[in-house]
Amino acid sequence: MLGRLWQVQILDGERYTQAAVADHVRRVAVPAVRGRILDDRGRPLARNRAAMTVTVDRIALRRQPDQGRATLRRLAALLGRPAAELSARLRPCGPGVGRPCWAGSPYEPVPVAEDVPARKATQIVERPEDFPGVTAEPRPVRDHPRGELAAHLLGYLAPGADGTVAGRDGLEAAYEADLRGRAGSRQVVVDSAGQVLRTLREQPPVPGSTLVTSIDADVQAVTERALERAVRRAGKGGASADSGAAVVLEARTGRVVAMASYPGYDPDVWSGGIEPADYRRLTGAGSPLLARAVQGQWPPASTWKVVSTAAAVGAGSPLTGRYDCPGSYRIGDHSFRNFGGADLGVMDLRRALVVSCDTIFYRFAHQMWLKGDDDPMQRMAEAFGFGARTGVDLPGEAAGRVPDRAWKKAYWERTRDETCRAARTGYPREKDRARAAYLKAVAAENCARGYVWTAGDAANFSIGQGDVLVTPLQLARAYAALANGGTLFSPRVAKEVRDAGGRPLRTITPPVAGRLPVPARTLDYLRRALAGVPRSGTAAAAFAGFPLDKLPVAGKTGTAEAYGAEDTSWFASFAPAGHPRYVVVAVVSRGGSGGEAAAPAVREIWSGMYGLEGHEPALPEGKR
């Protein structure tokens, strides 16, 4: 026994001491300060600020006679919050535990309130006997100095699995690896109850990098303001407009200058953990959280006709030919009509684009369909970048849709059972009997022959109606390719990554995604034709009085129709028309015709960018 005691205490004493200490040494992560997000002129869009934060030591609470309940009640009364909410924030996250909860280390204090007024924080610090285990100290929190500006672009932060915050959307998520920095660590010694006794060693964190974007904060503000005004104006004018999006691109580089979605939201609502009521509001009616510029999808309507024109000319229709534009064009037993049934006579393709003749494009599509060609309009649409994600450096981008024969058959196979059931039973819950009868007839036709790509499908596709879907960003980059001579870029929002000291780490350049298979002569013809739309075409009323002599704008309206719903308004444009520098695209859902809602919004954006019509110029070059 004496020998064994000597061995334990003397011979193996140091080993047992190290093991005992090791059992009580814990590693605690020290989060890094997150990097800033700047606009192209170095102005902060997202940064950090010091906010007075109240933290609670859970171990200290457990050591109190009532497990800290009285302390939490006093703290809740001081902060003006329910005690149950504070208790919930102290719960460790795990299976079956809903938020709020704590996902961080059990050996560090838990933040339960941010942005606490200095007066209340002082009371906590000066009255430790009333608030044992509670501390108030300044901590960095994410700050958006321009409020809701560019909220969908920036994204937001939310607690990660380790208790630290991480980007959950937008640039915050796309460049998480750059912005988050590298966490440090702290080794602490704890007693058997988990109370921290002392710090053994500490490795400081490395702050996150700064992300410089191509966003111009002033242009972004102009774009958001114009979009909101357009949606509200359309809503008051009898339409039920409720949402929209707008994009501004550099035509020659593919860089994003502004990108807006409406409705918006305040990204600071996520600070400290979002409240359930706020989350329901953001994901409920109107979906303010949806980044419509990259995730919203609509039929492009007549903005699509630049694609159809390029396809028709590529298939052999003369670029300088003359074409009849009757009030309707008959395919089988169905007449496809011009807007309003107008008979516009014989014209060239320039005039067809300016006045947005539909029947010329119906004929093009029908002739191609009769030849059984391999869907040349679809192949041209894909060459313009439609039907695939643009690759923009933002998460959650939608791909849009370019329907063709294969898609039609696959869709019919997926939906055949449901469609055929509707053909038999009809729509008894539809109160409008005429609409119910129409829907039943459509279901019967689709049940029998819904797998066939018909001439009617081809006609609708030629004018951007039917099953084709695009995002505003897809349309903007397609018009940028048209404007710049044929280069299709994969757009980028970020421009440069710098370390915390401001030294460049890497440059981010929009890669070239492809080249339009369209001759330069055709592209030049299209650009010249679109310059006539704001002067004497479908956007003439929207641009009446606009100084087109100072800033020639080229563009195309679009009015996407849907049975039983109001039209979606589009306008896609570039300027200056002769030497395009920027592309501006806007869409207003349920906003009416393209000239009624989207075109006035784009006009306001151009005016704001270049300082026209009484606006202060948002662009630096607009000041010259």
Image: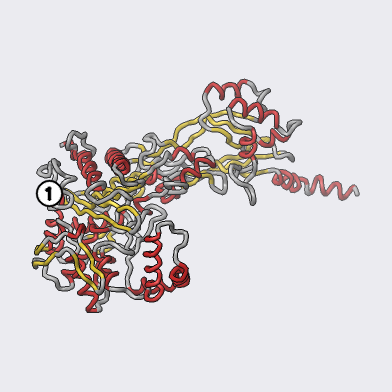
When the figure is inspected, residue 337 is found, relative to residue 194, above or below; the finding is below
Residue underneath mark 1: 535
Task: Give the quadrant of residue 522.
Answer: bottom left
Could you tell me residue 111's position as x and y percent? Answer: 58, 36
In the displayed structure image, the side of residue 35 where residue 73 appears, left or right: right
In the displayed structure image, the side of residue 446 where residue 535 appears, left or right: left
Q: Can you name the residue that lies furthest to the bottom here? A: 371
Q: Can you name the residue that lies furthest to the right here? A: 1
Depth check: give the residue in front, 416 or 118. Answer: 416
Q: Amino acid at mark 1?
A: Arg
Depth check: give the residue in front, 584 or 213. Answer: 584
Q: Is residue 273 visible?
A: no
Q: Can you name the residue that lies furthest to the front here? A: 433
In the displayed structure image, the side of residue 550 where residue 569 appears, left or right: right
Secondary-structure class at tag 1:
helix
Depth check: give the residue in front, 61 or 585. Answer: 585
Could you tell me residue 183's position as x and y percent? Answer: 52, 44
When the figure is inspected, residue 131 is found, relative to residue 554, above or below; the finding is above
Say which quadrant the C terminus sits in.
top left
When the figure is inspected, residue 569 is found, relative to residue 344, above or below; the finding is above
Depth check: give the residue in front, 14 or 567. Answer: 567
Residue drawn at (37%, 46%) of the image: 153
Could you tell me residue 232's position as x and y percent? Answer: 32, 41
Q: Is residue 374 visible?
A: yes
Task: Give the quadrant of residue 230.
Answer: top left
